[in-house]
Image (spheres, helix red, strand yellow):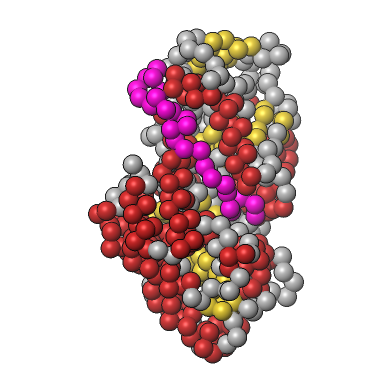
Amino acid sequence: MTDANEGSDVSRRDYIKAAGAGTIGVTGLAGCMGGGGEGDSTTTTDSGSETTTESSDGGDTTTEDSSSNYNTLEVQHWWTGGDGAAAVEALFEGFKQKHPDIKVNQNPVPGGAGQNLKTVIKKRVLNKNPPSSWQAWPGAHLQPFVDANKLKDIGDSVWGTNDMKSAYKQGPKDVAKPGGKFVTVPINIHRLNNLFYNKKVVESAGVDPSSISKPSDLVSAMKKVENKTDAVGMAHQTKSAWSTSQLWAQVLLGEYGRETYVAFTEGKVEANKKAIKDSLSIVKEYKQYFNDDAGSISWTEANKKVINGEAAFFHQGDWAAGMYRGQDGFEFEKDWGQVPFPGTDGIYALNMDSFPFPKNNPSPKATEKFLQYCGSVEAQERFNPKKGSIPPRTDVPKDKFGPFLSRQMDDFANSESQVKSIQHGLAIPPEAKSNFGDAMSTFTSGWNVDKTYKQLTQAFN
């Protein structure tokens, strides 16, 4: 799972330094890269079959000869290995079977845990040469493109097909329309509010993970583990801050509830000072139960400690379960288990991938067909079992997903609310996310609650 730990993000001001209304936003967007000019431009594809005219306000009109004469569909993504590569190949295999008349150019951009792709896409969009679509976290992550009027409203052309609006729950629909209009199609969900555990270790310690009612109560459970077994309370990595950022977000959610979590994502930091500082303090308490080598290992190496019985608990996105399922003799509900992070029952914390529809699109008809397919039962049934994720549609059959993901699908379908990931930028725009990451890096380097809180108060400015 290479997209768990992503690199630093590009700030929102890098996209729209002159962010304002109408032409100012787009002029500022172009000016950031020094590419492109003002006013109208006309682009004709090599085939001569399509002409796109983009006005200075970022709008466009695109035509093709006919629906049976498609230009090449170019899709960029960072899934170049492991479960992601297998999943995206299954997706395109199904699409080609359904639309054999559409030529597909997968143009992956590996490396940087997705950051390389983000850089390429920003440049291409600014230069009015976007791919047909690309892999993108939805929600606030796409807000700079929305503000610059670079994404097309697909509420009717795509979301009006395949019963998508009724099959998607509210959380995934919300992240698909960061500016109020549908501009992207989420294809998967990775859950963030998980607590994984080694069953033998917790049973030896006399700890029942399902009985831990809130994050602060997890401290005594970890202490009990370390008093009664040779395992550490929690496997974790602090080599980079993202794992701790995720962990803190679940602590805030579980200890203080959805309203406080959402208020933080809206920038209401000082109004929730006690909750934010208490949550930081709880994570700081957890630290004494981390493995001693937390500062020098990766999340996968930390996860191996759960598999080997060297740690009782592990917090991570549900990509962690892919390692368990790939380990011979380590079976779900026999050797390992999962519960919602304490205090988050009934909530599904979302990280998602999606495919947006850019304006000035080189293949609008083909892109429309592709996004319609991504929103279908068939596509999500193909993609998600291989990816180790669940579909955002609630009507996808469970028979291909195995026991763990099937249970996650049930939890999602029955969830009372779905909250957006802070760490992955679904809940907060790029500049705030970058500042949030800086604050959490400060936290993991010195574990200073007051200093970290002060940085968080400035993150949304």
In the displayed structure, does residue 86 sit left or right of residue 378?
Answer: right
Residues drawn in magenta: 1-25
Residue at image x 60%, y 59%?
319
Give the main secondary structure of the magenta stretch: loop
Counting labels gives: 0
- Vertical relation: 332 (above or below) 97: below
The percent coordinates of residue 117 (x first, y second) are 62, 37
Residue 42 placement: quadrant: top right
Answer whether residue 29 is magenta in the image.
Answer: no
Seen from the viewer's position, the closer of residues 152 and 275 is 275
Quarter where residue 230 is shown: bottom right
The quarter of the image holding the N terminus is bottom right
Q: Is residue 329 above or below residue 58?
A: below
User: Left or right: 76 with respect to 32?
Assistant: right
**Residue 173 appearing in the image:** no
Q: Position of residue 79 (x, y in %)?
A: 67, 45
Question: Looking at the image, is 37 positioned above or below residue 347?
Answer: above
